[in-house]
Amino acid sequence: MQENTGVTAEYPGDAEVTDDFGLAGVPDAFQRLWTPHRLAYIKGGQNQFKNQDDCPFCVAPSRTDEESLIVRRGKTCYVVLNLFPYNPGHLLVCPYRHVPDYTDITVQETAEMAELTQTAMRVLRKVANPSGFNLGMNQGVAGGAGIAAHLHQHVVPRWGGDGNFFPIIAQTKAITQTLDEVRQQVADAWPEESDLSGETDA
């Protein structure tokens, strides 16, 4: 008895848009999202940035906010969109100084990193209504830091069901907005300096 896999020879409408050129392959039931842009990051590995000259967190502030996906510039730290987001609105809070460890930053840098993180959460709640957040710093290569030489804190908005089979089983993440759209939304909603003192989560 032949197993029924549910795969048909063709999908409706295929004939109108498909030529007779064929490539080798065995049909199956999987749909595929191709993400070739991630190959450069994957091939680079964790140790590709070792000094300030090639560190993307050091280079980013020298370019425009739009080019670098910067959301907010502070005095000692800045906020940037993650180029490889876990979820839309995944932000990174980075000190300008090229230091690897949380114990390397000053009291002023620590305070501003905390303030920017809190404001990032408030802004993301306003523009995207997440039901939770993951905050964290991966310290060192063994700790999972993608760029271990330059300290950065992740601010990841979370929604119920965002940890479904796609990222867990298929190692695929569907992102519904372009990075420049998300950057603009978050930057536009970021409060001015004078508004920060009176902010609450209410």
Image (spheres, rainbow, N blue to C red):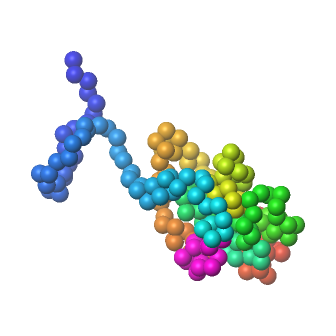
Q: Is residue 13 left or right of residue 42?
A: left
Residue that appears at 16% across and 48% down = 22
Q: Position of residue 134 (x, y in %)?
A: 68, 52
- The residue lying furthest to the top in this view is 1
| x and y, in percent, of residue 76 in the image | 77, 74
Picture coordinates of residue 77, whole percent (x, y): 74, 71
Predominant secondary structure, magenta span:
helix
Q: In the shown orientation, is residue 70 left or right of residue 33? A: right
Name above or below for residue 103 compared with residue 123: above
Residue shown at the point (19%, 51%) measured from the top left: 14
Magenta residues, as a range?
57-70
Q: Quadrant of the C terminus?
A: bottom right
- The reply to whether residue 111 is in sight is no
**Residue, x 65% and y 61% (percent of image)?**
50
Q: Residue furthest left?
A: 20
Residue 58 visible in the snapshot: yes
Residue 62 covered by magenta stretch? yes
Q: Describe residue 110's horizontal placement relative to residue 69 as left or right.
A: right
Looking at the picture, tell me which residue is in the foreground, 60 or 31: 60
For residue 105, above or below residue 146: below
For the point 55% across and 63% down, the residue is 83
Residue 129, horizontal then vertical, whole percent: 62, 60
Quadrant of residue 48 in the image?
bottom right
Relative depth, front residue between 201 and 3? 3
Extreme residue toward the right, this view: 107
How many numbered markers are drawn? 0
Residue 148 left/right relative to 76: left
Q: Is residue 114 magenta?
A: no
In which image quadrant can residue 188 be found?
Answer: bottom right
Q: Nearer the viewer, residue 102 or 45?
A: 45
Say which quadrant the N terminus sits in: top left
